[in-house]
Amino acid sequence: MDYLPRPDDTRFLLHEVLGAGEQWRALPAFAEVDDALADQVLQEAGKFVAEAIAPLNRAGDAVGCRFEAGAVAAPPGFRAAYQAFWQAGWPALSADAAHGGQGLPAVLEAVLYEWLSAANQGFTMAPGLLHGAYECLKHHGSPELRERYLAKLATGEWLATMCLTEAHAGSDLGLVRTRAVPRADGTLRVDGSKIFISGGEHDLADNIVHLVLCRLPDAPPGPKGLSLALVPKLLEGGARNAVFCERIEEKMGLHGSPTCAMRFDEATGWLIGEAGRGLAAMFVMMNAARLHVALQGIGMLDAAWQKAHAYAAERRQMRAPGAQGTEPSPIAEHPAIARILDTQRAWIDGARLLAYRTGLRLDLARHAEDPKARAAAQRWCALATPVLKAACTQQGFEGASACLQVFGGHGYVREWGIEQHVRDVRVAMLYEGTNEIQAIDLLVRKVLPDAGADFSALLLELRDELDAAREADADAQRRLAQLRYLATSVALASQARPRLAYEVADDFLRVTALALLAWAWARIAAQAPDDVRWSQPAAAFRRWVLPEFDMRLAMVKQAAQAVAQAAAG
């Protein structure tokens, strides 16, 4: 079965739980966006994804991309689907109207990409970086570059890549060696090699705009010496630039997306932003990019759950405990299978609410007139995005594997398609910064510098939201309070032993994710206490997911206490 978006569930979370319409109406940029318009966009998006994108998923995996003499051919149907995608205006959903966009809230774009990832992540990798390239060029590109490229990227007529990684420099971007030498005409001569470049070469669009991290002559070593260059596949007039795809990788999954090794051989490029400020230009898109990766984890887990749920409803094996008669029961009625399915549903919907809240906060951070509102929204995005990226992609992989378990031996063969989800989602734990880097970013770079003050303010904001909505779930409130205290304890202990924060970062992120999920389910349960669609996974969350909070809390707490005792003794 192909993935099927469920706009009704999304509408409930956006409107009934989060009150998205009220938030949009408070922003002049979205004064004309009401619930009816948002619902229409979601309905049409769901229809397009189900009819045009999801049916290509199996062929994209089975056939994959073909590489020949430096050219890459996408799987059957992909080019036609992409042309229909951009011509229908989907890449331009949240781009400015001045650039050919529709000027809609970013959270609607986030929902679209969640569904695209669930339906066909191999396809979705192609337009996946458009929003980031657009924002980078919009904020840092020269007027000439914006005039030439911005509308093409905003509409998706041309596609984009982010060329960062080199064979010797993975997460340590300060080791990048690609060189860019200024020419007299104001262009750059770019030389170097990049690996793991998603969509570095393909036939989906007529041009590909590469954003290349590079080093100018006499630049200092390390990350402060990096610049960012725009290097198109085709130059003005249609001449081919000196940009070459040397191979595509043979990967565990995402066979529908070409992962390319690229060579720039005296290619022509243009500087984006200031010299030596390449990382600053790149990081303008980081929160949105990490949110989209979190939604990949959620979407692909939902796709795996849909397959497992449908299979479990039809497959009959033995009689379930308490079943009447002599006929075998659907395996969905067996407690072990019900636990798997309900647990994944708890993760999917709780994480969705947090991701949608983050999408709404991105809109506030960009468009709110009140500086304090913008600052509070940016605080949420900075702290929540590493948590969501790491937790949602980890659960995407582990949950997809659990869904494969529902199929028994049938899940291990290709016929049912569940094994593809396990393979495809695994990479999301690696790109846009590995999950370990996300944990370090959260604790070491975001929480510790101000001894947890911003982190505490965020948790108090969540507490106040529960109180204001009369959703004062005592258990959720307790978890938020415990997390505030834990952050303070780790901050104090880290002064005595700086290594501690790096040792417990993964556990700290995990306990944070579980506290946020407890808040999310308190919000959901209060709005739909008698609806089995929500009450059943809410119960599963409390029974099967939330107990991990106490374990992770104890692990971090004990480590911090041990450091404090050693320092005192």
Image (spheres, helix red, strand yellow):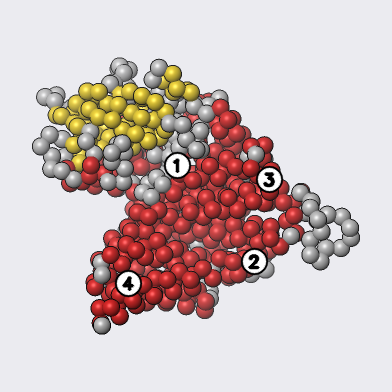
Find the residue positioned furthest to the right. Answer: 325
* Residue that numbered label 3 is attached to: 409
* Residue that numbered label 2 is attached to: 535
Quadrant where the N terminus sits is top right
Quadrant where the C terminus sits is bottom left
Give amino acid for label 4. Answer: Val
Q: Residue at x 62, y 63 (%)?
A: 537
Q: As drawn, is 563 to the left or to the right of 202? A: left
Q: Nearer the viewer, mark 3 or mark 1?
A: 3
Who comes first in sequence, dot 4 or dot 1? 1
Give the crowd class for mark 3: few <14, some 14-19, many >=20 residues within 10 Å: few
Give amino acid for label 1. Answer: Leu
Q: Is residue 568 visible?
A: yes
Q: Quadrant of residue 26?
A: bottom left
Q: Nearer the viewer, mark 4 or mark 3?
A: 3
Residue 178: image location, x then y, percent: 23, 33
Q: Residue at x 51, y 38 (%)?
A: 253
Who comes first in sequence, dot 3 or dot 2? 3
* Residue that numbered label 1 is attached to: 93
What is the distance, in whole Å, between disc 1 and disc 2 at their CAs? 33 Å
Q: Nearer the viewer, mark 2 or mark 4?
A: 4
What is the distance, in whole Å, between disc 4 and disc 1 at their CAs? 42 Å
Q: Is residue 463 visible?
A: no
What is the distance, in whole Å, between disc 3 and disc 1 at their CAs? 42 Å
Q: Which mark, by number, is residue 490?
A: 4
